[in-house]
Amino acid sequence: MKLTDLLSPELIKIPIESTEKKGVIKELVDLLVKNNKVSGKQAVLDAVLEREKVMSTGVGQGIAIPHGKTDGVDTVVASLGISKKDIDFQAIDEKPVHIVFLLVAPPYETGLHLKALSRVSRLLSKEEFRKKLMNAKDARTAMKFIQEEEKKYFEI
């Protein structure tokens, strides 16, 4: 499974409008709803927000990877948001977030959910790639950057 299997330009929002955690998560869930990726918007939103209560998914270096598990989806789904504005995500490094990658999975897809989280983490750990994403002018460009990066690191 590749992130490009989960994402499409329609699931990428540049720029994210909100500058606070709950608003950003809602925007990214709304993208999933708009593109018929979820069957229960409120269930998805609740699952992700509940996970945030446990510990912030602001992982540092300007990145947040909010995620959750719910019956509101049939398979692992994702959306991506990028903002030039600072987003307060209560990140572990206490710095603002600019790249937010939302992942949602059904409760029975633990393996795929963890694999997707791992892929996102690995790609976004590279500073050069984060800079490219931050400079993406639109969703198609961001998608192209993700495809190029996955080819570099995940092709066998």
Image (cartoon, rainbow, N blue to C red):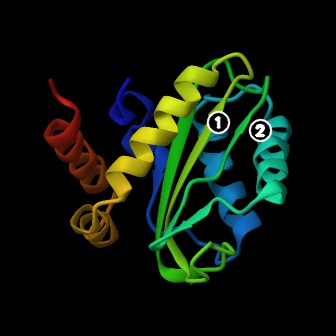
Give the residue drawn at x 78%, y 29%. 70
**Is the residue marked by circle 1 packed among few (<14), some (14-19), or many (20+) residues within 10 Å?**
many
Q: Where's residue 40, x and y in %?
A: 80, 30
Viewer-nearest residue: 68 or 122: 122
Residue 104: mark in rendering: 1
Position of 12 relative to 44 (above/below)? below
Q: Where's residue 84, x and y in %?
A: 44, 80
- Judge left or right: residue 123 versus residue 10: left
**Is the residue marked by circle 2 packed among few (<14), some (14-19), or many (20+) residues within 10 Å?**
many
Viewer-nearest residue: 116 or 143: 116
**Quarter that holds the C terminus:** top left
Viewer-nearest residue: 60 or 10: 60
Give the residue drawn at x 78%, y 49%. 51
Q: Contact, CB < 8 Å: mark 2 with mark 1?
A: yes
Residue 44: mark in rendering: 2
- Judge left or right: residue 52 versus residue 87: right
Of callouts 2 and 1, the N-terminal one: 2
Identify the amino acid type marked 1. Val
Identify the amino acid type marked 2. Val
Give the residue drawn at x 69%, y 29%. 38
Name the element at disc 1.
strand
Q: Quadrant of residue 5?
A: top left
**Quarter that holds the N terminus:** top left
Give the residue drawn at x 31%, y 63%. 133
Q: Where's residue 3, x and y in %?
A: 38, 35
Q: Where's residue 53, x and y in %?
A: 84, 58
Position of 71 relative to 59 (above/below)? above
Viewer-nearest residue: 58 or 29: 58
